[in-house]
Image (cartoon, rainbow, N blue to C red):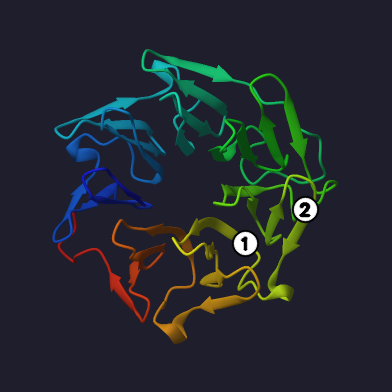
Amino acid sequence: MYQDRSGNIWFGTNGDGVCRFDGQNFEYFSIKEGFAGEAVRGIVEDNVGNIWFATNGGASRYDGQAFTNFTEKDGLPANDLWSIARDSKGNIWFGSVAGLCRYDGRGFAAFSLPLAQTDTAPVFSRKLVWSILEDQAGNFWFGTDGAGVVKFDGTAFTTYTTRDGLGTNTIQCVYQDKSGTFWFGTRAGGVTRFDGQTFETFTQKNGLCHDFVWTIAEEESGCLWFATAGGGASRYDGTTFINFGPEHGLSNRHVQSILQDKKGGLWFGTSGGVFRFDGRGFTNFTKPARGC
Protein backbone atom coordinates (compact mmCIF):
# COMPACT_ATOMS: atom_id res chain seq x y z
CA MET A 1 0.00 0.00 0.00
CA TYR A 2 1.14 3.54 -0.72
CA GLN A 3 -0.30 7.04 -0.38
CA ASP A 4 0.80 9.46 -3.08
CA ARG A 5 1.35 13.20 -2.77
CA SER A 6 -2.22 13.86 -3.96
CA GLY A 7 -3.62 11.76 -1.13
CA ASN A 8 -4.68 8.76 -3.21
CA ILE A 9 -4.06 5.38 -1.61
CA TRP A 10 -2.85 2.60 -3.90
CA PHE A 11 -3.51 -1.02 -3.00
CA GLY A 12 -1.42 -3.68 -4.73
CA THR A 13 -3.19 -7.01 -5.07
CA ASN A 14 -1.96 -10.55 -5.57
CA GLY A 15 -3.82 -11.26 -8.78
CA ASP A 16 -5.94 -8.28 -9.80
CA GLY A 17 -3.37 -5.58 -10.51
CA VAL A 18 -3.62 -2.37 -8.52
CA CYS A 19 -6.49 -0.39 -7.04
CA ARG A 20 -6.56 3.38 -6.42
CA PHE A 21 -8.71 4.90 -3.67
CA ASP A 22 -9.34 8.66 -3.77
CA GLY A 23 -11.18 8.75 -0.45
CA GLN A 24 -14.52 7.87 -1.96
CA ASN A 25 -14.13 5.59 -4.95
CA PHE A 26 -11.98 2.57 -5.83
CA GLU A 27 -10.60 2.30 -9.36
CA TYR A 28 -8.91 -0.86 -10.64
CA PHE A 29 -6.05 -1.13 -13.13
CA SER A 30 -5.04 -4.47 -14.59
CA ILE A 31 -3.30 -5.83 -17.66
CA LYS A 32 -6.18 -4.78 -19.89
CA GLU A 33 -5.57 -1.16 -18.81
CA GLY A 34 -1.90 -1.52 -19.70
CA PHE A 35 -0.56 -2.56 -16.29
CA ALA A 36 2.51 -4.84 -16.28
CA GLY A 37 1.40 -7.74 -14.08
CA GLU A 38 -1.27 -9.29 -11.88
CA ALA A 39 0.63 -9.26 -8.57
CA VAL A 40 2.05 -6.08 -7.01
CA ARG A 41 4.97 -6.34 -4.57
CA GLY A 42 5.82 -2.66 -4.02
CA ILE A 43 4.81 0.92 -4.87
CA VAL A 44 6.75 4.23 -4.78
CA GLU A 45 6.39 7.75 -6.21
CA ASP A 46 9.26 9.42 -8.04
CA ASN A 47 10.43 13.03 -7.89
CA VAL A 48 8.04 14.22 -10.58
CA GLY A 49 4.94 12.42 -9.33
CA ASN A 50 5.00 9.24 -11.42
CA ILE A 51 3.87 6.15 -9.52
CA TRP A 52 6.06 3.06 -9.93
CA PHE A 53 4.98 -0.52 -9.29
CA ALA A 54 7.06 -3.66 -8.83
CA THR A 55 5.04 -6.57 -10.24
CA ASN A 56 5.38 -10.19 -11.29
CA GLY A 57 5.45 -8.97 -14.90
CA GLY A 58 8.08 -6.25 -14.64
CA ALA A 59 7.89 -2.61 -13.58
CA SER A 60 5.05 -0.21 -14.39
CA ARG A 61 5.27 3.59 -14.34
CA TYR A 62 2.03 5.58 -14.21
CA ASP A 63 2.05 9.25 -15.18
CA GLY A 64 -1.61 9.87 -14.33
CA GLN A 65 -2.79 9.01 -17.82
CA ALA A 66 -1.09 5.83 -18.99
CA PHE A 67 1.27 3.05 -17.94
CA THR A 68 4.77 2.53 -19.30
CA ASN A 69 6.12 -0.94 -18.65
CA PHE A 70 9.70 -2.14 -18.28
CA THR A 71 10.90 -5.74 -18.53
CA GLU A 72 14.09 -7.74 -19.01
CA LYS A 73 14.25 -6.32 -22.54
CA ASP A 74 14.75 -2.87 -20.98
CA GLY A 75 17.43 -4.00 -18.54
CA LEU A 76 15.66 -5.54 -15.55
CA PRO A 77 17.46 -8.64 -14.20
CA ALA A 78 14.10 -10.47 -14.27
CA ASN A 79 10.43 -9.64 -14.67
CA ASP A 80 9.49 -11.17 -11.32
CA LEU A 81 10.05 -8.23 -8.97
CA TRP A 82 9.70 -8.40 -5.18
CA SER A 83 10.84 -5.01 -3.90
CA ILE A 84 11.14 -1.36 -4.92
CA ALA A 85 12.53 1.80 -3.28
CA ARG A 86 13.29 5.41 -4.25
CA ASP A 87 16.52 6.84 -2.85
CA SER A 88 17.37 10.40 -1.85
CA LYS A 89 18.92 11.07 -5.28
CA GLY A 90 15.77 10.03 -7.12
CA ASN A 91 17.01 6.64 -8.30
CA ILE A 92 14.53 3.76 -8.28
CA TRP A 93 15.81 0.40 -6.99
CA PHE A 94 14.28 -2.96 -7.86
CA GLY A 95 14.82 -6.33 -6.22
CA SER A 96 14.08 -9.31 -8.46
CA VAL A 97 14.47 -13.08 -8.29
CA ALA A 98 17.63 -12.66 -10.38
CA GLY A 99 19.20 -9.83 -8.44
CA LEU A 100 19.18 -6.11 -7.83
CA CYS A 101 19.18 -3.15 -10.21
CA ARG A 102 18.96 0.65 -10.12
CA TYR A 103 17.14 3.00 -12.52
CA ASP A 104 18.60 6.50 -12.84
CA GLY A 105 15.99 7.98 -15.17
CA ARG A 106 17.84 6.87 -18.29
CA GLY A 107 18.36 3.16 -17.89
CA PHE A 108 18.74 0.16 -15.60
CA ALA A 109 22.10 -0.89 -14.15
CA ALA A 110 22.70 -4.17 -12.36
CA PHE A 111 23.94 -3.91 -8.76
CA SER A 112 25.68 -6.99 -7.39
CA LEU A 113 25.57 -7.92 -3.72
CA PRO A 114 28.10 -10.12 -1.93
CA LEU A 115 26.01 -12.92 -0.46
CA ALA A 116 27.09 -14.74 2.68
CA GLN A 117 27.18 -18.51 2.65
CA THR A 118 24.67 -19.79 5.18
CA ASP A 119 22.82 -23.00 5.94
CA THR A 120 19.51 -21.28 5.16
CA ALA A 121 17.80 -22.49 1.98
CA PRO A 122 16.29 -19.64 -0.07
CA VAL A 123 12.54 -19.46 -0.54
CA PHE A 124 12.95 -18.61 -4.24
CA SER A 125 16.51 -17.57 -5.07
CA ARG A 126 19.68 -16.54 -3.25
CA LYS A 127 19.79 -13.48 -5.49
CA LEU A 128 16.34 -12.31 -4.47
CA VAL A 129 16.13 -9.06 -2.45
CA TRP A 130 12.96 -8.89 -0.36
CA SER A 131 13.49 -5.38 1.00
CA ILE A 132 15.48 -2.22 0.21
CA LEU A 133 16.05 0.71 2.59
CA GLU A 134 18.12 3.89 2.49
CA ASP A 135 18.78 4.88 6.10
CA GLN A 136 18.99 8.31 7.69
CA ALA A 137 22.75 8.46 7.03
CA GLY A 138 22.48 7.48 3.36
CA ASN A 139 23.53 3.85 3.76
CA PHE A 140 21.59 1.16 1.91
CA TRP A 141 20.28 -2.02 3.50
CA PHE A 142 19.10 -5.07 1.59
CA GLY A 143 17.08 -7.92 3.07
CA THR A 144 17.94 -11.13 1.25
CA ASP A 145 16.48 -14.58 0.67
CA GLY A 146 18.65 -16.68 2.96
CA ALA A 147 21.83 -14.58 3.14
CA GLY A 148 20.90 -12.17 5.93
CA VAL A 149 21.11 -8.38 5.65
CA VAL A 150 23.65 -6.57 3.47
CA LYS A 151 24.61 -2.97 4.25
CA PHE A 152 26.26 -0.74 1.63
CA ASP A 153 27.83 2.55 2.74
CA GLY A 154 28.68 3.74 -0.76
CA THR A 155 32.07 2.03 -0.76
CA ALA A 156 32.03 -1.20 1.23
CA PHE A 157 29.56 -3.95 2.08
CA THR A 158 28.85 -5.38 5.54
CA THR A 159 26.79 -8.54 5.98
CA TYR A 160 24.84 -9.58 9.07
CA THR A 161 23.46 -13.08 9.59
CA THR A 162 22.22 -15.28 12.42
CA ARG A 163 25.84 -15.53 13.56
CA ASP A 164 25.61 -11.83 14.44
CA GLY A 165 22.21 -12.07 16.08
CA LEU A 166 19.52 -11.99 13.37
CA GLY A 167 16.44 -14.11 14.05
CA THR A 168 16.84 -15.89 10.70
CA ASN A 169 18.74 -15.27 7.47
CA THR A 170 15.62 -14.65 5.36
CA ILE A 171 14.77 -10.98 5.83
CA GLN A 172 11.31 -9.94 4.62
CA CYS A 173 11.62 -6.27 5.58
CA VAL A 174 14.11 -3.70 6.82
CA TYR A 175 12.92 -0.63 8.74
CA GLN A 176 14.56 2.27 10.57
CA ASP A 177 12.47 4.01 13.21
CA LYS A 178 12.51 7.69 14.11
CA SER A 179 15.15 7.14 16.79
CA GLY A 180 17.50 5.55 14.24
CA THR A 181 17.09 1.98 15.46
CA PHE A 182 16.87 -0.74 12.81
CA TRP A 183 14.26 -3.49 12.75
CA PHE A 184 14.47 -6.62 10.61
CA GLY A 185 11.30 -8.61 10.01
CA THR A 186 12.22 -12.21 9.39
CA ARG A 187 10.61 -15.28 7.93
CA ALA A 188 9.77 -17.48 10.94
CA GLY A 189 12.39 -15.91 13.22
CA GLY A 190 10.42 -12.98 14.67
CA VAL A 191 11.67 -9.41 14.49
CA THR A 192 15.23 -8.35 15.30
CA ARG A 193 16.17 -4.93 16.67
CA PHE A 194 19.63 -3.49 15.97
CA ASP A 195 20.90 -0.35 17.69
CA GLY A 196 24.13 -0.25 15.71
CA GLN A 197 25.98 -2.35 18.26
CA THR A 198 23.82 -5.21 19.47
CA PHE A 199 20.97 -7.33 18.16
CA GLU A 200 17.87 -8.35 20.09
CA THR A 201 15.20 -10.64 18.67
CA PHE A 202 11.53 -10.70 19.69
CA THR A 203 9.36 -13.75 18.97
CA GLN A 204 6.05 -15.17 20.11
CA LYS A 205 7.77 -16.02 23.39
CA ASN A 206 8.13 -12.26 23.97
CA GLY A 207 4.55 -11.45 23.00
CA LEU A 208 4.80 -11.01 19.21
CA CYS A 209 1.70 -12.50 17.59
CA HIS A 210 3.61 -14.55 14.99
CA ASP A 211 7.24 -15.18 14.03
CA PHE A 212 6.79 -14.50 10.30
CA VAL A 213 6.94 -10.69 9.96
CA TRP A 214 6.04 -9.32 6.54
CA THR A 215 6.42 -5.60 7.14
CA ILE A 216 6.83 -2.87 9.77
CA ALA A 217 5.23 0.56 10.15
CA GLU A 218 5.53 3.36 12.72
CA GLU A 219 2.80 5.58 14.10
CA GLU A 220 3.32 9.28 14.67
CA SER A 221 3.40 8.38 18.37
CA GLY A 222 6.44 6.19 17.77
CA CYS A 223 4.66 2.90 18.40
CA LEU A 224 5.59 0.19 15.92
CA TRP A 225 3.26 -2.17 14.10
CA PHE A 226 4.32 -5.58 12.80
CA ALA A 227 2.32 -7.32 10.07
CA THR A 228 2.56 -11.09 10.27
CA ALA A 229 1.75 -14.09 8.11
CA GLY A 230 -0.80 -15.91 10.20
CA GLY A 231 -0.99 -14.08 13.53
CA GLY A 232 -2.60 -10.77 12.62
CA ALA A 233 -0.81 -7.57 13.67
CA SER A 234 1.21 -6.60 16.73
CA ARG A 235 1.60 -3.10 18.16
CA TYR A 236 4.75 -2.42 20.21
CA ASP A 237 5.08 0.60 22.49
CA GLY A 238 8.70 -0.05 23.41
CA THR A 239 7.80 -2.29 26.31
CA THR A 240 4.75 -4.41 25.52
CA PHE A 241 3.17 -6.08 22.50
CA ILE A 242 -0.59 -5.74 21.96
CA ASN A 243 -1.91 -8.17 19.37
CA PHE A 244 -4.86 -7.68 17.03
CA GLY A 245 -6.82 -10.43 15.33
CA PRO A 246 -10.40 -11.61 14.68
CA GLU A 247 -11.50 -10.83 18.23
CA HIS A 248 -10.76 -7.15 17.51
CA GLY A 249 -12.30 -7.09 14.02
CA LEU A 250 -9.19 -7.94 12.02
CA SER A 251 -10.79 -11.11 10.72
CA ASN A 252 -7.93 -12.10 8.45
CA ARG A 253 -4.70 -12.98 10.26
CA HIS A 254 -2.50 -12.92 7.14
CA VAL A 255 -1.35 -9.27 7.07
CA GLN A 256 1.21 -8.32 4.43
CA SER A 257 1.26 -4.53 4.58
CA ILE A 258 0.50 -1.62 6.92
CA LEU A 259 0.08 2.05 6.02
CA GLN A 260 -0.63 5.11 8.16
CA ASP A 261 -2.35 7.67 5.96
CA LYS A 262 -1.96 11.44 6.15
CA LYS A 263 -4.97 11.71 8.44
CA GLY A 264 -3.55 9.20 10.90
CA GLY A 265 -5.72 6.26 9.87
CA LEU A 266 -4.11 2.83 9.76
CA TRP A 267 -4.65 0.46 6.85
CA PHE A 268 -3.88 -3.25 6.94
CA GLY A 269 -3.50 -5.19 3.68
CA THR A 270 -4.50 -8.84 4.08
CA SER A 271 -5.35 -11.89 2.01
CA GLY A 272 -8.99 -10.99 2.74
CA GLY A 273 -9.04 -7.41 1.48
CA VAL A 274 -7.95 -4.26 3.28
CA PHE A 275 -8.91 -3.21 6.81
CA ARG A 276 -8.97 0.36 8.10
CA PHE A 277 -8.41 0.91 11.82
CA ASP A 278 -9.68 4.12 13.43
CA GLY A 279 -8.25 3.40 16.87
CA ARG A 280 -11.42 1.70 18.03
CA GLY A 281 -12.33 -0.88 15.41
CA PHE A 282 -11.66 -2.26 11.94
CA THR A 283 -13.63 -1.70 8.73
CA ASN A 284 -13.10 -4.24 5.94
CA PHE A 285 -13.01 -3.30 2.25
CA THR A 286 -13.07 -6.04 -0.40
CA LYS A 287 -13.23 -6.30 -4.16
CA PRO A 288 -16.72 -5.71 -5.58
CA ALA A 289 -18.45 -8.79 -6.95
CA ARG A 290 -18.61 -7.25 -10.43
CA GLY A 291 -14.81 -7.45 -10.64
CA CYS A 292 -12.35 -5.11 -12.33
x and y percentages locating residue 266 in the rendered image? 37, 65
> Circle 1 is placed at which residue position?
212
Mark 1 belongs to which amino acid?
A: Phe
Residue at 34 percent of width and 63 percent of height = 264
If you read the primary sequence from the N terminus, does the residue marked by circle 2 or circle 1 appear first?
Answer: 2
Whether 25 is drawn above or below 70: the answer is below
The quadrant where residue 65 appears = top left
The quadrant where residue 271 appears = bottom left
Whether 251 is drawn above or below 56: the answer is below
What is the distance, in whole Å, between disc 2 and disc 1 at their CAs? 18 Å
> Circle 2 is placed at which residue position?
199
Label 1 neighbourhood size at 10 Å, few (<14), some (14-19), many (20+)?
many
Label placed on residue 237: none
87 or 173: nearer the eye?
A: 87
Whether 138 is drawn above or below 37: the answer is above
Query: Residue pushed farthest right?
Result: 163
Q: How many marks?
A: 2
Whether 269 is drawn above or below 95: the answer is below
Residue at 68 percent of width and 48 percent of height = 170
Is 235 displayed left or right of 53 in the figure?
right
171 or 123: nearer the eye?
A: 171
**Secondary structure under the numbered disc 2 in the rendered image:** strand
x and y percentages locating residue 135 in the rendered image? 57, 38
**Secondary structure under the numbered disc 1 in the rendered image:** loop
x and y percentages locating residue 63 in the rendered image? 21, 30
Mark 2 belongs to which amino acid?
A: Phe
Is 232 displayed left or right of 25 in the figure?
right
93 or 156: nearer the eye?
A: 156
Is 133 displayed left or right of 38 in the figure?
right
Q: Nearer the viewer, mark 2 or mark 1?
A: 2
Residue at 33 percent of width and 44 percent of height = 38
Label 2 neighbourhood size at 10 Å, few (<14), some (14-19), many (20+)?
some
